[in-house]
Image (cartoon, grey):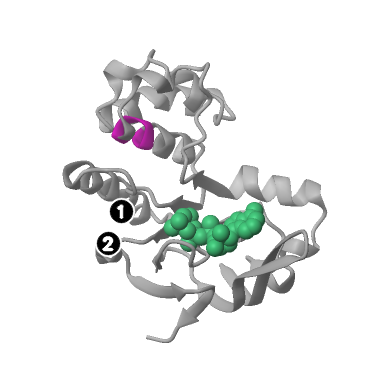
Amino acid sequence: MIEINNISKQYRRGTAVFTALKNITIKIDEGEFCSVIGSSGAGKSTLLHIIGGLIHPDSGTLFYNGDDLYKQSSRNIDKYRKECLGFMFQQFHLMPYLTVNENIKLACYNRKQIDNIDYFLEKCSLSEMKNKYPSELSVGEKQRTAFIRAIISGPELLLADEPTGNLDPVNSKILMSLLKEFNNKNGTVVLVSHDTGMSDYANRRIILEKGMIIPS
Ligand SMILES: Nc1ncnc2c1ncn2[C@@H]1O[C@H](COP(=O)(O)OP(=O)(O)OP(=O)(O)O)[C@@H](O)[C@H]1O
Ligand SMILES: [Mg+2]
């Protein structure tokens, strides 16, 4: 499904150059639950954004279902993001002036998906928060709202950036079971986290350190 070959990414600011990812090669099959574990600054978000079509790598290739993603037009990359992906961002990126329901609705493409919102709100214990704004939510509630927004359109691939980063153990467990359930229904999951415990839910663990994969 995803074939990452020899990808590198450097950030430049003025004359300073920082290597965030160096020669990353990973193959992820459809239906996998893959965790990428690494400490802060290891390059986890950079990697996830590259898989998500949000940051162009400096070198290397990423094939998605046989297509070389970064050789596609920006229109096709947009299409990939829209049709194939759900993204849970490290900082949630919920729209502050929209309610929980409206935030999720933004990610829907048809009536059927909109009609499914209540089902997922119920499942995620958020029914009572439906008409609240993000500023009125706890972190766990924001995180679960971001989860529903990411999966409401039925993506084949879910990219989750530290989905439990700010949660207590009970809320972490709830969120991880939701991710696992998505995976059990044939969704592919790539999760990045600094928390090694998160890889218990995954069928594969990749360790990232200083922008490089550590052989296991
Ligand atoms: N836009 C940027 N400009 C310059 N350096 C950046 C930029 N984005 C990230 N970096 C640097 O690249 C490295 C990797 O960043 P990244 O956000 O991918 O790490 P991370 O593993 O997700 O960390 P965290 O666990 O703290 O979220 C870090 O050292 C960071 O300072
Ligand atoms: Mg990060």
Q: Is mark 1 in CB contact (under 8 Å) with mark 2?
A: yes
- Which residues, given as a range, are shown in magenta? 140-144
The image shows a total of numbered marks equal to 2
Nearest the viewer among 92 and 110 is 92
Looking at the picture, does residue 44 appear above or below residue 141? below
| Residue drawn where x is 41% and y is 27% of the image | 116
| Residue drawn where x is 56% and y is 49% of the image | 85
Q: Which mark identifies residue 180?
A: 1
Looking at the picture, does residue 21 appear above or below residue 80? below
Kindly state the secondary structure of the residue where label 1 is placed.
helix
- Nearest to the eye among marks 1 and 2: give it: 2
- Indicate left or right for 51 with 192 as reference: right
Residue 55 quadrant: bottom right
Q: Main secondary structure of the magenta part?
A: helix
Report how far apart the C-alphas of labels 1 and 2 lie in the structure.
7 Å
| Residue drawn where x is 32% and y is 70% of the image | 203
User: Is the distance from the Cβ of mark 1 to the nearest ligand 2 atom less than 8 Å?
Assistant: no
Tag 2 residue: 201
State the image coordinates of residue 66 (x, y, percent, origin top left): 67, 69
State the image coordinates of residue 47 (x, y, percent, origin top left): 56, 63
What kind of residue is marked 1? Lys
- Indicate left or right for 14 with 110 as reference: right
Closer to the N terminus: mark 1 or mark 2?
1
Quadrant where the N terminus is found in the figure? bottom right
What kind of residue is marked 2? Tyr
